[in-house]
Image (cartoon, rainbow, N blue to C red):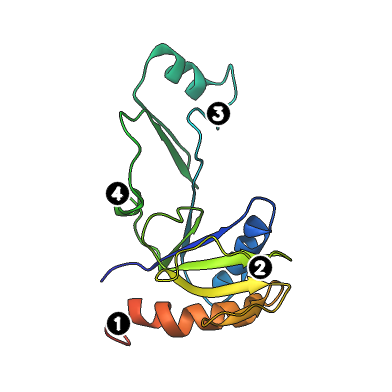
Amino acid sequence: MNTPIISIVGKSGCGKTTLIEKLIRELKKRGYHVATVKHHSHPGFEIDHPGKDTWRHAQAGSDHVVIAAPDKIASIRTLQKELTLDEIAQGIQDVDIILTEGFKRAGKPCLEVVRGDKDLICNDDQLIAIATDTPLQASVPQFNLDDSLSIVNFLETNYLSKSRGNLEF
């Protein structure tokens, strides 16, 4: 059984992160386990703080730094090449759905966030729905940006029920 991956895409500043936060909250209310993957298109980001132990480990040359606590774990790896979304997803376990922010070229179903602008950035064959503040001419379902309930209903009907074995892929 494959975990569904839905990419939330849109132009910079359109509200992707805000929508993802709302979707996560609603999915969690319904009892789903959710993973998220944020695509950062530029090399070299830091999630650790200078001077902290894990930062010091990485600065000393560790290729894979893991910090583990009783309630969470984080991992930072040095890569020779950018991993594909499928390669990243292989390392994510025990979730019902993976929401990505970005990855519009990964070939996954995309929900595009559009604010005011009528130009879509997603390929037609990947576009499954639109969250917008402006009605658009499109052949896919459209939802209001603030209607996370209806968007999650859509995801549940079309993707989550499939991953739980209720429907076939």
For marks 4 and 3, the one nearer the N-term is 3
Amino acid identity at mark 2: Lys
Question: 97 and 106: which one is in front?
Answer: 106
- Distance, label 1 to label 3, CA atoms, is 39 Å
Question: Where residue 108 sits: x, y (%)?
Answer: 38, 63
Q: Residue at x 41, y 54 (%)?
A: 105
Question: Where residue 15 sits: x, y (%)?
Answer: 68, 59
Q: Secondary structure at mark 2?
A: loop
Q: What residue did someone put label 3 on?
A: 48
Q: What residue did someone put label 4 on?
A: 87
Residue 26 sits in which quadrant? Answer: bottom right
Q: Residue at x 33, y 42 (%)?
A: 83
Q: Residue at x 62, y 54 (%)?
A: 11
Instruction: Between label 4 and label 2, give the one nearer the viewer.
Output: 2
How many residues crowd mark 3 within 10 Å: few (<14), some (14–19), many (20+)?
few
Please state, as top left, top right, bottom left or bottom right, where the C terminus lies in the image.
Answer: bottom left
**Image position of 13 (left or right of 38):** right
Q: Which mark is residue 118?
A: 2
For marks 1 and 2, the one nearer the N-term is 2
Q: Is residue 39 above or below residue 121?
A: above
For marks 1 and 3, the one nearer the N-term is 3
- Distance, label 1 to label 2, CA atoms, is 37 Å
**Image position of 91 (left or right of 98):** left
Q: Is residue 108 above or below residue 141?
A: above
